[in-house]
Amino acid sequence: MRYPDGGGLTAEERARRERVRLAAADLIEAGVSDGEVARRFRATRMSANRWRRALAAGGRQTLVSKRPGGARCKLDAG
């Protein structure tokens, strides 16, 4: 297991990343280059380009956080 202590992002961390992506979308829509978006948000140009492509393909909704990653727990209360 890669993260023995639970790993992953908390809801707060996911929300922060979502805010960054949506703020980056504002700049992308304003015509700012991938390099400049990446610099302003301390991200990679690859991430900025991925955000640009997602925005073009499906709008701002594609940049919204979905849910925690990973497999769902298969255990029940019992």
Image (tube, rainbow, N blue to C red):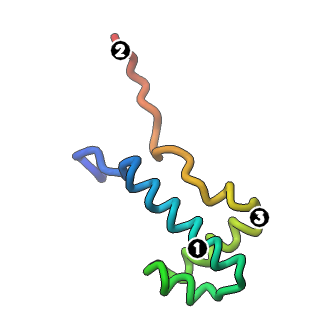
Task: From the image, tell me which residue sits under label 1.
Answer: 24
Q: What is the C-alpha distance between the residues marked 2 and 1?
A: 41 Å
Rendered residue at 55%/74% (across/down): 47
* Callout count: 3
Whichever of callouts 1 and 3 sits on the residue coming sooner in the sequence is: 1
Q: Position of residue 1 (x, y in %)?
A: 29, 48
Q: Residues within 10 Å of mark 3 (few under 14, many from 20)?
A: few
Q: Residue furthest left?
A: 5
Residue 16 is labelled as: none
Residue 77 is labelled as: 2
Res 22 quadrant in image: bottom right
Rendered residue at 36%/49% (across/down): 10
Q: Is residue 18 above or below residue 40?
A: above
Q: Is residue 72 above or below residue 34?
A: above
Pick the residue in front: 62 or 16. 16
Task: From the image, tell me which residue sits under label 3.
Answer: 57
Q: Secondary structure at mark 3?
A: helix
Rendered residue at 69%/65% (across/down): 54
Q: Residues within 10 Å of mark 1 (few under 14, many from 20)?
A: many
Rendered residue at 46%/45% (across/down): 68
Q: Name the kind of residue labelled 1 in the image.
A: Ala
Res 78 quadrant in image: top left
Q: Is residue 47 left or right of residue 25?
A: left
Q: Name the kind of residue labelled 2 in the image.
A: Ala
Q: Residues within 10 Å of mark 2 (few under 14, many from 20)?
A: few
Whichever of callouts 3 and 2 sits on the residue coming sooner in the sequence is: 3
Q: Position of residue 30 (x, y in %)?
A: 70, 81
